[in-house]
């Protein structure tokens, strides 16, 4: 139980960052390239974007696929979709 609590706390700590949350929400719609993800987070620098993507990938939440010079990111952990569905339902009600 203690290990499970640690894993959930780690996930929530990652999602507590507004930029990372925006990136993950954008990837709910499907895989996206770095340029598309940069457009989702207003004012983010490329180095900051790279750090956030690296943190999410390192935690096993994202996967990346490189094709030549282009990298496409997608969700790697299916539980992430479920967590965000609950958050959206509870905190983002339809108008």
Image: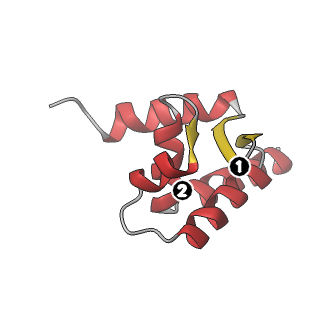
Instruction: Report the front residue among 21 and 74.
Output: 74
Q: What residue is disc 1 on?
A: 69
**Circle nearer the viewer, 2 or 1:** 1
* Residue 72 quadrant: top right
What is the crowding at mark 1: few (fewer than 14 residues within 10 Å), some, or many (at least 20)?
few
Colour setup of the view: secondary structure
Q: Residue at x 60, y 53 (%)?
A: 12
Q: Earlier in the sequence, mark 2 or mark 1?
A: 2
Instruction: Report the front residue among 14 and 46.
Output: 46
Q: Residue furthest front?
A: 68
Q: Residue at x 66, y 30 (%)?
A: 79
Q: Quadrant of the C terminus?
A: top left
Q: Residue at x 78, y 45 (%)?
A: 60
Residue 11: percent from left, percent from top: 67, 51
Residue 59: percent from left, percent from top: 77, 51
Q: Which secondary structure, mark 1?
A: loop
Q: What residue is disc 2 on?
A: 20
Mark 2 vs mark 1, CA separation in Å: 23 Å
Q: Residue furthest left?
A: 95
Residue 57: percent from left, percent from top: 74, 50
What is the crowding at mark 2: few (fewer than 14 residues within 10 Å), some, or many (at least 20)?
some
């Amino acid at each position: 139980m203690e290990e499970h609590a640690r894993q959930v706390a780690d996930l929530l700590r990652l999602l507590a960052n507004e930029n990372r949350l925006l990136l993950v929400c954008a990837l709910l719609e499907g895989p996206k390239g770095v340029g598309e993800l940069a457009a989702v987070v207003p004012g983010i620098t490329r180095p900051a974007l790279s750090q956030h993507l690296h943190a999410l990938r390192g935690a096993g939440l994202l996967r990346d696929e490189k094709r030549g010079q282009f990298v496409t990111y997608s969700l790697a952990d299916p539980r992430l979709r479920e967590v965000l569905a609950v958050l959206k339902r509870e905190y983002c009600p339809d108008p």
